[in-house]
Image (spheres, helix red, strand yellow):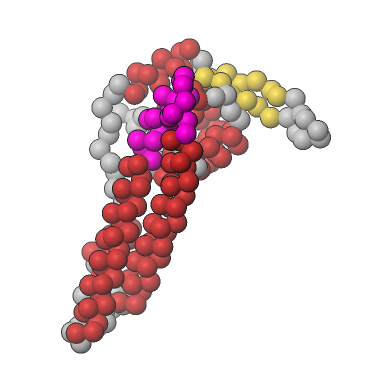
Amino acid sequence: MPKENRTKFAILGMLDCAPMSGYDIRKMSAISIAHFWKEDYGHIYPTLKLLQDEGLATKEEQASVEGRPGKHIYSITAKGREALVAWLAETPNPPNLRIELLLKVFFGARAKAKNLSGMLAAQEEACRAAIDELNATEKHLQEEVEGEGRQSRTARFQLMTLRYGKRYYESLGAWCRESLDELGAAERSGRPNIAGTRARA
């Protein structure tokens, strides 16, 4: 059985928020769903073509403005909205976890402690940066939630996913700090540390 294209539902969801160009979808994804749903940007235009072929979206040419080239604006159709709603009612697939940092820590007895420490420190810093970015977005969404209409309702659900992201990065950052402390304690004790200063070939 062929694997279902989940990218098309991510794009349909974006188009249900507003008509967009492929570039708009890419830009919006980068500041919203990219925190929990990574898309290969090379899939966006082929998927938009697929949505058109299936009657789930339409394309309209937007005239050039002030010397800028024209662009194609995609909109969700009634059939596309029905498909999106049907997909939203389905039970989600289990997460497909492939976390390379955890894989390296798991086999860390063969690694150099300083290398693992560097990876953990970099990840901890990335978590702090992500939390700062999410905090700024959270403030904006909270203002929208306090408004009225569809935009307010949409923002409420977006705020739920944002708070998941914050908890995730807070937890991951705390784990990085704990692991760094454990590596440091092993080095200070003079014991062969758990990250393998005696790494084998």
Using residue 141 as the reference point, say whether residue 190 is left or right of it.
left
Q: Could you say which quadrant of the image residue 65 lies in?
A: top right
Q: Is the magenta stretch mostly helix, strand or loop?
A: helix
Residue sitting at 34 percent across and 24 percent down? 88
Along the line of sight, the residue nearer the viewer: 110 or 89: 89
Question: What's drawn in magenta, residue-wise?
Answer: 143-162
Q: Where does the image place residue 124, in percent across and percent down from the top left?
A: 37, 62
Q: Residue furthest top?
A: 78
Q: Quadrant of residue 10?
A: top left
Q: Which residue is drawn at 43% across and 41% down?
A: 138
Q: Does the magenta stretch include residue 144?
A: yes
Vertical placement of residue 181 versus 151, above or below:
below
**To which quarter of the image does residue 129 belong?**
bottom left
Is 189 placed above or below 14 here? below
Considering every residue shown, the one lying at the far right of the view is: 67
Task: Give yes or no for residue 49 being in the magenta stretch.
Answer: no
Q: Is residue 100 visible?
A: yes
Left or right, 197 with reference to 19: left
* Quadrant assignment for the N terminus: top left
Residue 194 lies, in percent from the top left, at 21, 75
Whole-percent x, y for residue 155 in the image? 43, 30
Q: Where is residue 67 in the image (x, y as percent from the top left)?
A: 81, 35
